[in-house]
Image (spheres, rainbow, N blue to C red):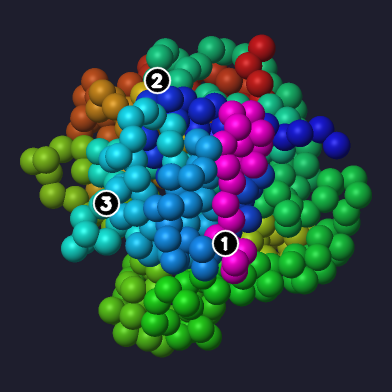
Amino acid sequence: MAVLVRGVEPVLHARLKRHKVVVLEGARAVGKTTVCRRLVGDLGGTYFDLADQATRQGFELDPEALLLGADTPVVVDEAQLIESLPLAVKRVVDRRDGNGQVLLTGSSRISRGALGGSDPLAGRASRVAMYPMTVGERAGHPVNVLGGWFESSPKPAGSTEVPHTEVVWRVLQGGLPGTALTQPNETTNDEWWSLAGEVMPAYVESALSLLYGKYDADRRRLTRAIQYLSANPAQILNVSRVANELEISRDTARRYIELLADSMLVHVLPGERPSAHKTLTAHPKLVVFDTAFAAWAARVPPGELLLNGLVWGGLVENAVALELLAQASWSSPSISVGHWRQDADEIDLVLTGSDGRLVGVEVKAATTVSNRDSSGLRALERRVGDRLHLGVVIYRGSVTYQMDDGMWAVPLTTLWEPAT
């Protein structure tokens, strides 16, 4: 079986050359361990897995001795299991010169509170996010379109016409290496539905088990919360509505969302405020960590997805958001992902470059688009002017073309096809 290279790998190599410590954070089973073992194989160094009880006990007794005695880079997997570890890492790297000393990975965010709420690794560490596999990664060629979008504009072109059934499959397949479920010509809808029903509950329990030990949280209610939130992918986050639906207090709902974001099972995209002089509603948008999980949580069998426009549209937008989040994490200079809403105007996703320029992205599950589909992008342009570098409408068609000045229709498949 061919080795699937992940888009984050060159990022890790580059960051280790520039920083003493690199922190790699991502949800359970997105492939962090495989990437880190491969990195140690390429660079040498030492690998420790704190999921192993004996290894964890050794680190709890004397982490500094283990870190100082190991060849660098020292990779510590599941580092969040020892809350005081970042402070020990700080002490070790402060005693030695040179970058690329330690790589920590975490399936929930590694503690930043060991020094009275501050980050012990501030000024020493670079944090990198890892997401489930993109469609391009699953095909063996990580694709990053974002640099091109910020450098210039798309070019008119045809794209591979992908049958709708295959698009559905690519959304359903998700990106968890261990659970991503099989190839489309090997699995029927009914088989996928049965397999998801077997795999996903165990995944929930495995991922949330890290939280149960770390926080005081009701197991049943937290499980209900992730299933409820995942069944409504790519939605504006309304904490009061979540609380009402789950029959919990607003404070508890907010806390559960924070816990799930802590384990990267949901991504909370901030509401962009592009103008400091404008008052606008800036509710965040919630993106589910994996579309296969979201499809299972929605309880809509694959054969009925297209009959439920709300669920299908949410899954497509969630899939696009995950592709762009992953590609943004590979990009240099940095790119952040949020969304924008003001009054009746809204844009699904807003990408912000390090220089403050914006790329607005609308996501449509339809096979055709019109100028009306760029109305939200035009509304943002009226408020930010030249800061809006590009407007993109992602759709299910097969042709890249300019809809209007600065506004482009771009096929969904562009996000995973290598440039030619």
Pointer 3: what residue?
120
Per the rendered image, the range of residues in magenta is 35-55
Q: Amino acid at mark 3?
A: Pro
Label located before the other in sequence (3 or 2):
3
Secondary element type, mark 2: helix
Q: Mark 1 against mark 2, which lies toward the viewer?
A: 1
Residue 259 vs 392, above or below: the answer is below
User: Mark 3 to mark 2: distance in Å?
Assistant: 34 Å
Q: Which residue is at 33% across, 80% downward? A: 252
Label located before the other in sequence (1 or 3):
1
Q: Is residue 313 visible to the viewer in this orientation of the structure? A: no
**Coordinates of residue 161 in the picture (x, y in percent):** 74, 28
Q: Which residue is at 53% across, 12% downward? A: 155
**Coordinates of residue 274 in the picture (x, y in percent):** 21, 37
Q: Which residue is at 51% across, 50% downward? A: 76
Seen from the viewer's position, the closer of residues 129 and 290 is 129
